Image (spheres, rainbow, N blue to C red):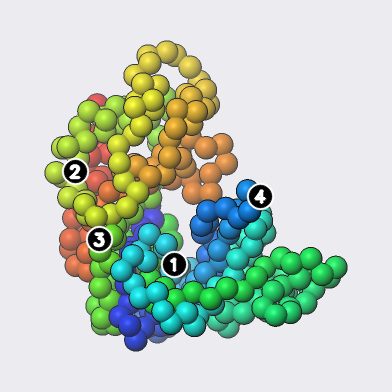
Amino acid sequence: MGLELELLAPPSQSRVTFARALARRVKGRVEYGFKYWSEGTLAGGRPLCRLSLAARVLERDGRVLATLVDDNTLHGGLPAAPRARTLHATDDLRLALLVERLGWGATAARRPEPVKALFGGFVEAGTLHDAFGHPLVVTMEEPVAHHRVCEVVTRPLEGPGEREAIVGLVLEVADALGCTVPPTAALHAHYDAAPWRSVRALRRLILTHATQREQWWRALSPNPRCLKLGPFPPAVVRVARARRRVPFRTFAAALSLAGVSKACDLNVLGVIEPHPRQPTLEVRCLPMSLDPVAVLRSLGAAEALLTACRRW
């Protein structure tokens, strides 16, 4: 399982300084790159794909410990000025995902030059062009405060011991830096999707949550101000209630057509999609805390509910 811990650095710090402090603790190093997130569409229906500065911490053996990224759901309440820091944007999702995957280097990627190495071409007036002069990536300003957002995405954690050690380490560094929990923050836990890729298991999960959501919320105590939570859509529940014997791929397709989305207490897209970016079941309705004991207790409560659901 992997974790996403949503934190906010103090005004004098950023996710880059957080990553550097974390790297010092493990005697590792930091690499810099980009994190893609979408923000609506441009004229003509093209997507606006933003690429914000990201930093990942590598341990001495080269393993990724965690990646620190932006999260646009945590920008609420942050100062909108001065707009001094930069990010990049493109209108091509495929290009954005390529930059996110390959644009890592040893220096902070605040200008298009690290991306230029991927494509050649030239940079002019803050825009990266291909060799024929077509614009690929533009540079845009963003509020300085957005760099305070620290979503700490851990690597997949092997067993309770590694989980306790990494949660303790991340939150100890966060506390030393003076980080806080954003008003809309959550703790997200990602579990291997494989055990849920059966009609019986996924049906049980959806129906149990649909009929016992109040009990789940009492057990998990989500942050009521957290964004993008909610029950499964009614059409999704109706699909789960249909007791027809069908292959899992057919069941998954029916759930997709019924309107499954990420913005639910439980995100099952990684379970039902044929080629998911994250092949996981994501529990999104967990409260964030700077206390490692509270974080581990929340994870234990979530796992108890999931285990009971599978035994139902």
- Identify the residue at horizontal 79%, vertical 65% (top origin): 134
Q: Label 4: few (<14), some or many (≥20) within 10 Å?
A: few
Q: Which residue bears the numbered disc 2?
A: 217
Question: Disc 1 or disc 3, which is closer to the eye?
Answer: 1
Instruction: Return the x and y of residue 84 as percentages of the image width and height.
Output: 49, 83
Task: Check residue 70 in the rendering and tell me which mark sits there, or answer none.
Answer: 1
| Residue that label 4 marks | 44
The disc, 1 or 3, on the residue closer to the chain's N-terminal end is: 1
Closest to the camera, between mark 3 and mark 4, is 4
Q: Secondary structure at mark 2?
A: helix
Residue type of the residue flagged with mark 3:
Met
Please state which of the two labelled residues, at mark 1 or mark 4, is closer to the viewer.
4
Task: Name the residue type under label 1.
Answer: Asp
Question: In which quadrant of the rendered image does the C terminus lie?
Answer: top left
CA gap between label 2 and label 3 equals: 14 Å
Task: Please name the residue that numbered disc 3 is placed on.
Answer: 288
Residue at the farthest right position? 132
Spatial CA span between label 1 and label 4: 27 Å
Q: Amino acid at mark 4?
A: Gly
Q: Is residue 61 visible?
A: no
Q: Nearer the viewer, residue 192 or 111?
A: 111
Distance Cα–Cα, label 3 vs label 4: 39 Å
Q: Give the percent coordinates (x, y) of residue 220.
A: 19, 48
Residue 7: x, y in percent? 31, 69
Viewer-proximal residue among 281 and 186: 186
Residue 244, position as x, y percentages in the image: 42, 13
Task: Give the alpha-carbon distance from disc 1 to disc 3, as whole Å.
Answer: 16 Å
218 vs 68: above or below: above
**Which of pointers 2 and 3 lies earlier in the amino acid sequence?**
2
Is 172 positioned to the left or the right of 98 in the image?
left
Question: Which amino acid type is shown beneath numbered disc 2?
Answer: Trp
